[in-house]
Amino acid sequence: MTLNAQYKASTYKLDAIDRAIIQATQSGLPLTSQPYHTVAEQLNLPPELLMERMQTMLDFGVIRRIGAVPNHYSLGWNANGMTVWDVTNAHIDDLGQQVGALEFVSHCYRRPRLMPDWPYNLFAMVHGKDRDEVAAKTAQIAALLGSNCHASDTLYSTQILKKTGLRI
Amino acid sequence: MWQMDATDKAIINGLQGGLPICEQPYLAMAKQFDISEDELLARLKNLLEQKVLTRFGPMYQIERMGGAFSLAALKVLEEDYEQVAEAVNALPEVAHNYRREHAFNMWFVLATETPSGIGKAIAKIEAETGYPVFNLPKEKEFFVGARFTA
């Protein structure tokens, strides 16, 4: 087990300093030559301490990654389909793993059915330049699931109503 | 109209993670794109202004700090849609919200600092909108790796 994997086995407990750092950076990192120093100055913390805390949060997976969050519509990814599938319970974990491994699936989860309104227990996000591309990719998922899939649907997004990420 | 050039695309594709935690992280990354630190900063500023990027910085995973995420959906009548979207979006617990073509036409992700926060946020949305919330917390994560190429 690597050090990183050991960290990831437990939940990280935030203290007041971590919380202040998250609140100062959750909407973005300053675009200055020394962004961590800029944040440290705002928070009245030594920059070394701030960088050490952020590194620890990264090691624990509290920070997933540090970088750009694109607006996929602006990049020409115009068709964004949430594909949903009613998969036989006995096979969902194995099949979910296989669907998640498809290179065009960006998120893949098992979720509860809510009968009678919602019979689907597998969710896979599929993106494309247009709906034909999404449909072609979705057909690959259908082929993979085969007779273990009893119903499916694709819910295309038509508007981003909010996309701020988390706020604590 | 402004258009992305090859360097912008390289930045978008190459910087969706991996900004180092060090004295001058942008300088370290600029070298990778063969541009100066100033140019990288100016391009990132522009990409944010053009709304090609929605954000630049750390992405936090609330479950790793003991919190919870959930996906929830509403079936909203067209005449109420705008008002309900406003009420839902007003909650800081709502991290993102999408309109989708389906009887369930509003889908949002809740992120709360404690697991019990999900139920509280849902109760608040139901009280404010009068619509029942369909809560679909994940039971298992098979893959998360959204990466969009420019």
Image (cartoon, grey):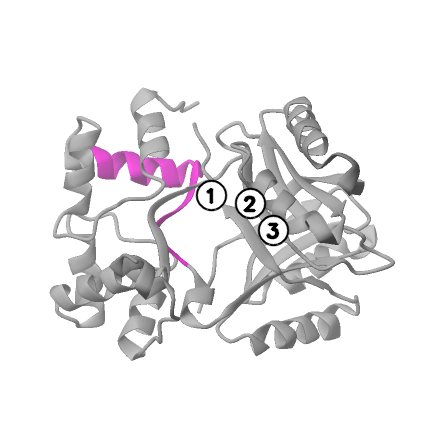
Q: Image check: A88 left or right of B113?
A: right
Could you tell me which residue is drawn at 29 percent across and 24 percent down? B7
Callout 3: helix, strand or loop?
Answer: strand
Q: Which residue is mark 1?
A: B145
Q: Which amino acid type is shown beneath numbered disc 2?
A: His
Circle number at residue A107:
2
Where B132 sits versus A32, above or below?
below
Could you tell me which residue is drawn at 34 percent across and 21 percent down? B5
Where B110 sits versus A76, above or below?
below
Task: Tell me if label 1 and label 2 are in contact, CB under 8 Å.
Answer: yes
User: Which quadrant does the N terminus of chain A fall into?
Assistant: bottom left
Callout 2: helix, strand or loop?
Answer: strand
Q: Which amino acid type is shown beneath numbered disc 3?
A: Tyr
Place residue B69 in its image quadrant: bottom right
Q: CA distance from mark 2 to mark 3?
A: 7 Å
Circle number at residue A109:
3
Task: Tell me if label 2 and label 3 are in contact, CB under 8 Å.
Answer: yes
User: Which quadrant does the C terminus of chain A fall into?
Assistant: bottom left
Boundaries of the magenta span: B39-60
Place residue A158 in its image quadrant: top right
Q: Position of residue B135 (x, y in %)?
A: 70, 64
Q: CA distance from mark 3 to mark 1?
A: 12 Å
> Does the magenta portion include B46?
yes
- Crowdedness of circle 3 by 10 Å Cα count: few (<14), some, many (20+)? many
Q: Position of residue B49 (x, y in %)?
A: 39, 40
Parent chain of label 3: A
- Crowdedness of circle 1 by 10 Å Cα count: few (<14), some, many (20+)? few
Q: Are marks 2 and 3 on the same chain?
A: yes
**Does any portion of residue B58 appear in the rendered image?**
no
Nearest to the observer: residue B15 or residue A94: A94
Parent chain of label 1: B
* Number of marks in picture: 3
